[in-house]
Amino acid sequence: MKTDTLFHGESCIHFCAIFPDMEATDTAFIRALPKIELHCHIEGTLEPELVFDLAERNGIGLSYPSVESLREAYSFTRLQDFLDIYYEGMNVLRTEQDFFDLTWAYLVRGNAQNLRHTEIFFDPQGHVDRGIPFETAVLGITSALDRAEREFGISSELVMCFLRHLDEQEAFRTLDQAEPFRDRIIAVGLDSSERGNPPEKFERVFQEAARRGYRRVAHAGEEGPPEYVYGALDSLGVERVDHGNSCLEAPELVRRLVREQVPLTVCPLSNLRLCVVESMERHPLAEMLDHGLKATVNSDDPAYFGGYMNENLEAVAGALDLGRDQLVQLTRNAVDAVFAPQSRRQALNDELDKFLASADG
Ligand code: HPA
Ligand code: ZN
């Protein structure tokens, strides 16, 4: 995939600000690196072409006349701008086949980028609240995950997110709807509009999810203050923090995250497109690694933010002049942070070792 076709519309950034230093970036190394993704919303992989295909298949009218005009609308200055268009885009997902096609398209791209393991998010409330049964989404998504494991050897886990702009009762209802699929969903997460929806709002739901055996993650510190990262740790008991950028405003919090080796699932192109950072050169990823934070790189909503795993790694490596050691550290951090069984974690580590031995030789 050519990177220059990935950027669309006017927003707070310019193409040249993203890849100022592409020649110097070790693109061949990045592309060949075995990759692990821990923060990707499957609904955020919905490319405009697929929006149009699914709209036609399901007889749905769109408010954009063309794929290009839809892409041009992907111009954001904050998280809420994106979320409005993200929820609108989801409306074309109606059948199990639609969810399969969505997930399969992501995995085919992942395979082309040497993705070896992924732990994807989905937003059941975004579907159930439009009248799409919970099982339609889960069955479509999991059948694509199963096929990718068979055909590509890409292993995966599924994380169910609660929409934090909705209330606690609705999250409890979603937890109950997930019961028949308990064996397919490894963790619960928390996403959507962060400001004004602190983690504490979902403390009891997360407690109940833990009691039922779910692992826990939550978005925190993307637009919200460091207090929300503390809230995710202390009220929700999360094992990984999704984003976590604002922790750098609080030295004591950084020390704790380092001490406890809490993984952060950082999303560079997302941060740029949502204006969480001013430019890629000012992205805090290198600083996070320097502190000893367990940072990882992820794509978040790649169809909306201009790139999948390779593009995120290339963008951040180019802008921050990351060397191979740092790229490998980011990947090791991701291996350590997976929720997959220990045997799979070991296999992913072995694969990385083998790759590094061959890259050296
Ligand atoms: N932040 C919060 N909620 C989301 C995101 C995000 O980046 N993507 C999809 N839902
Ligand atoms: Zn996210």
Image (cartoon, rainbow, N blue to C red):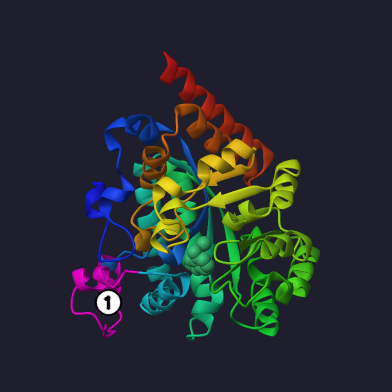
**Region of the chain picked out in magenta, as a range:** 49-75
How far across and how far down the image is residue 213, in percent? 76, 60
Quadrant of the rendering where the C terminus is positioned: top left
How far across and how far down the image is residue 309, in percent? 41, 47
Q: Answer above or below: position of 214 versus 23.
A: below
Q: Answer above or below: position of 69 versus 213.
A: below
Q: Determine if residue 65 is in view.
A: yes
Q: Is residue 72 left or right of residue 179?
A: left
69 within the magenta span: yes
Q: What residue is shown with label 1?
A: 57
Circle 1 packing at 10 Å, graded few (<14), some (14-19), many (20+), is: few
How far across and how far down the image is residue 15, in percent? 26, 52
Q: Is residue 346 left or right of residue 138?
A: right
Residue at 60% x, 57% y is 246
Query: What SS does tag 1 mark?
Result: helix
Q: Nearer the viewer, residue 155 or 306?
A: 306
Residue type marked 1: Arg
Residue at 60% x, 61% y is 221
Q: Is residue 15 left or right of residue 304?
A: left
Q: Nearer the viewer, residue 344 or 75?
A: 75
Q: Answer above or below: position of 278 versus 313.
A: below
